Image (spheres, rainbow, N blue to C red):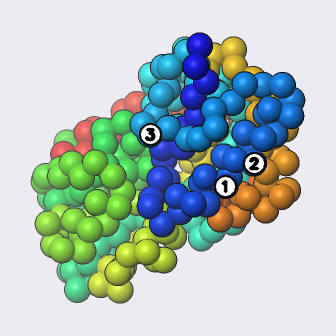
Amino acid sequence: MTPLATLPMYDWPEIATAQTAFWGAIRDGLRARRIAAPEALSQGTGWREPGLVFSQTCGWPWASTYRDALDLVATPVSALPGCDGDTYSSMVIVRADAPFDTLADLRGARVAFNGMESQSGVHTLREAVAPLGDGAPFFGQGILSGAHRESIRAVARGAADCAAIDAICWAMAQRFEPVDDLRVIHCTAPAPALPFVTRRGGPVAALRAALEDAIAGGYGEPVFVHALAEPDAARYDALIARVVDAPPLF
C-alpha cells in the first residue's frame, strides 16, 4: 500500500511552497514516530485511496459522503477575519458598484459557486437565504465555477452577481487577487473548520502529534493554521441538519 498525502482545499500556487514546508514538517514527525509517509504531497483528494495518510476535506462531503472512508484527525483554528476559534464563515461578495446591500437584494440574482458539495460555497448560503424565500429557490441562476477563486473572478468580471467565499479563501484573495472592485455584504453563520483527516483506521494519534509539532515550529501560520481543536463528528453532521428544510439555491 503506497502512502499518500494531499492538501487540496487551499492549494493556491502562491502558498504552494508553504504547503510543501507544512507537509514536510508533518512527514518528518510521522517518520520519527515510525509511520510511513510519502516524501511529497500529491494532487487531487485521494479521499478513498487505501494508502491515504493525511488530507483535508470540506465538512459537508465528510458528513454526507466520506465518513465511512475518512477518520477525523483535528479541526484547524485560524486567526483570520471570519474565523472564530475552530469555526469559519463565508463572505457573500458582490461588485462594489452593484445595487445590492443585503441578502434580500440578491433575490433572482446570478450566484457563482465552487461545487454542489461545498459547505462554504453552497450550503451555508442555502441556510442564509432560506428565511428570505417562500420555499422556492432564491437565486435566478447558478454558475458553476469549480473553485472559490474562480467564483471571485466571476463576480469581479460581472459574469455573476454574487458568491459565498470561505473566509480563508477571501483572506487569500485579498493578498493575491485584485479585489478592490468587490465588497462583502454578508457574513454567514459559523461552521466547524475544514477538518484534517486520514483513511479509516489511519494514524490519527501520530498525525495529531505531528501536526502539533509542525504548528509549534511555525509551519502552520503560512498556511493559516494557528492551532488545533478536537474534532467533533456531531458538529459536522449538524451541517446537514441545518439545511434539511432549505430549498435549493437556484
**Residue 112: image location, x then y, percent:** 24, 56
Read off the residue under disc 2.
25
Q: Is residue 213 above or below residue 236?
A: below
Total marks drawn? 3
Give the residue at x 46% y 34%: 45
Q: Earlier in the sequence, mark 1 or mark 3?
A: 1
In the image, what residue type sits under mark 2? Ala
Secondary element type, mark 3: loop
Going from N to C along the chain, the mark reached first, 2 or 3, is 2
Q: Quadrant of residue 84?
A: bottom right
**Residue at point 26%, 68% (across, down):** 153
Helix, strand or loop under label 1: helix
| Amino acid, disc 1 | Ala
- Rendered image: mark on residue 188: none
Which amino acid type corresponds to the residue marked 3 in the rendered image? Gln
Q: Is residue 235 left or right of residue 129?
A: right
Q: Is residue 147 left or right of residue 64?
A: left
Between the residue at mark 1 and the residue at mark 2, the CA separation in whole angstroms equals 6 Å
> Can the viewer see residue 71 in this picture?
yes
Q: Nearer the viewer, residue 248 or 75?
A: 75
> From the viewer's perspective, is residue 66 above or below residue 122?
above
Q: CA distance from mark 2 to mark 3?
A: 18 Å
Residue 200: give x, y in percent of width and height: 63, 16
**Quadrant into which the N terminus falls:** top right
Residue under label 3, please give it. Answer: 43
User: In this figure, which residue is indicated by the disc labeled 1?
Assistant: 21
Check contact, mark 1 vs mark 2: CB within 8 A.
yes
How far, Cα to Cα, is label 1 from label 3? 16 Å
Q: Residues within 10 Å of mark 1 (few under 14, many from 20)?
A: some
Label 3: how many residues lie within 10 Å, few (<14), some (14-19) or many (20+)? few
Q: Nearer the viewer, residue 149 or 141?
A: 149
